[in-house]
Amino acid sequence: MTARLPDDAPVPGLLRCLGCSMFIASFEEEGYNTLKDLRADEEEVVKEFISALGMPNRTDERLLEWAFERKGEGGSKSSKGAAGGGAKTSEEEEDGDEEEEDEAEDEVRDQKIPSCGVFDPAWLAAVAPLYSRHMGCENMGPLLYSLARFVKPQSCLEIGAGYTSAFLLQALEDNAKELKAWEQWQRESGIEDWLVEGIEKSASSSGGLLHCVDNLAHEGTTANRLLAVAHRLGLESRLALHLDDARAFLDEYTGECIFDFVWLDGFLDFAFAGGGLKGRGGGGGGSSAGGTVVDGLEAFMEDMWPRIAPGGFVLMHSTLTNSTTRAWIQDLASRDSKWGPPGALLSLMEPHKRFQNAV
C-alpha cells in the first residue's frame, strides 16, 4: 500500500531523500517544483522527462510512485482520476478505503506487529466494571500496560486490585504472544541471533503471573469483581488474587516470590507501622503505638526490597499531591535507605487533576 503524498510536497526535498539532489535544477527548469506540478501533466509525459535524466538505482520509479500512486509494474493511478478522466465517485472512494484497510491489516499480520488488545472497545467494555472514577486510574491503566509490554516482566505484584489489574494481566498475555511470534519469525527467517539468548524459553513458558493483593478495605474497591472480569477476558490463568493484608502476604507467602514489576496502588491502606508482620506487633493492618504512616512505609519497603529482582521496577500511586508519600519520597532521595539503593526516582504527574494524579 502506497499512501498518497500531499500536492504541496516539494520535489527538491523528495529528490534529496532519494539521493538525487543533482537533478533539482532540471526539475526546476521544467517547472516541476511540487508534486502538484508533476500531477498536472499526464503521467506518460512526466515519465518520459524523468527517463531522459537517467536517474540511478530505480529512483525514477520511486519518484513516479510517489507522484502518481503507482503500485508496481502492474498498473498505475493517474492524478486525472477514474477511467474517462472524471473524478472518483463516493462509492469508488469508499471501496478504495476498504482496500487500503485490508492491505494494512495484511501488513500487520505479515510483519507480526504485536497486538494491543487493551485499545479494543470490546475489551474496554469488559473491564468497565472495575473502573471507579475517584480511584484516578483511567490513564494509569494504559500507562502500566505500555510499560509492562516494553520491559517484559515475568512476575508482577500489585498492591490494591482493581482497574489497573486488567491492564497488567493483558500485558502479560500479549507479551507471551509477542515472544512466541518473535521466536517463530526467528526460526522461519533463519536469523538465529536476533533474540536474546534464552528468550525462547520464556516465549514457550506460561508467560507471566500477576499477584494481586487486596484487603477489600477501601470503600471504593472493585477488587471483588476482578476474578469475573479476568475470566471473561480469558486471563484468569495469569492472576493470583490474594485477599489479605499486603504485609502479611509478604511475611507468609511461601511460593516463588521475586518480583520484577511492582505496582503499589493501595500502598497507604497497607503501610501502617507494625501492621500484619510477625515480630512487629499488631495485626490486620492497624498501626502500632507511636508509629507513623512513614514508619509503616519504611517497614513495608524494608520487607519487600529483598523480593525485588535486580533491575526491577517499583511504581507507586499518588507520589506528588499526597503529602505523606511525597514527604517520604523526598526524604528517601536525600539519604541512604535501610532497605537498599532505591535506584532512580522519577515522578510523572497528570496536570489536570488535584488528586490521584501521579506515579
Image (tube, rainbow, N blue to C red):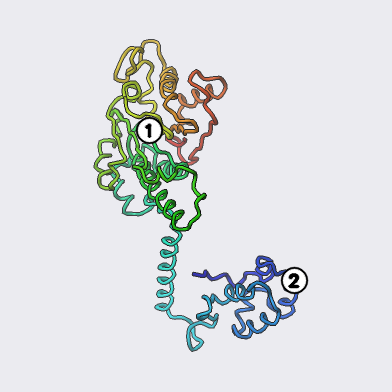
- In the depicted structure, whether residue 140 falls above or below residue 336: below
Query: CA–CA distance between discs 2 and 1?
Result: 60 Å
Spot occupied by residue 38 in the image (x, y as percentages of width and height): 63, 78
Tag 1's secondary structure?
Answer: strand
Q: In the image, what residue occupies the spot 45% across and 30% down?
A: 309
Q: Residues within 10 Å of mark 2 (few under 14, many from 20)?
A: few
Q: Tell me, yes or no, if residue 216 can be seen here.
A: no
Q: Residue 220: horizontal and vertical position, in percent?
A: 30, 34
| x 54%, y 71%: residue | 4
Give left or right: position of 37 versus 279.
right
Q: Quadrant of residue 208?
A: top left
Q: Which mark is residue 141?
A: none
Q: Which of marks 2 and 1 is nearer the N terminus?
A: 2
Name the one closer to the observer, 61 or 2: 61
Asked if residue 232 lies left or right of residue 154, the reply is: left
Residue drawn at 32 percent across, 42 percent down: 131
In the depicted structure, whether residue 289 falls above or below residue 269: above
Residue 318 percent across, percent down from the top left: 44, 32
| Residue denoted by label 2 | 22
Disc 2 marks which amino acid? Met
Q: Find residue 330 and report its horizontal and vertical position in percent.
A: 53, 25
The number of numbered badges drawn on the structure is 2
* SS state under label 2: helix
Q: Which residue is drawn at the image coordinates 62% and 69% (left, top)?
A: 9
Q: Residue 157 carries which label?
A: 1
Kind of residue at badge 1: Leu
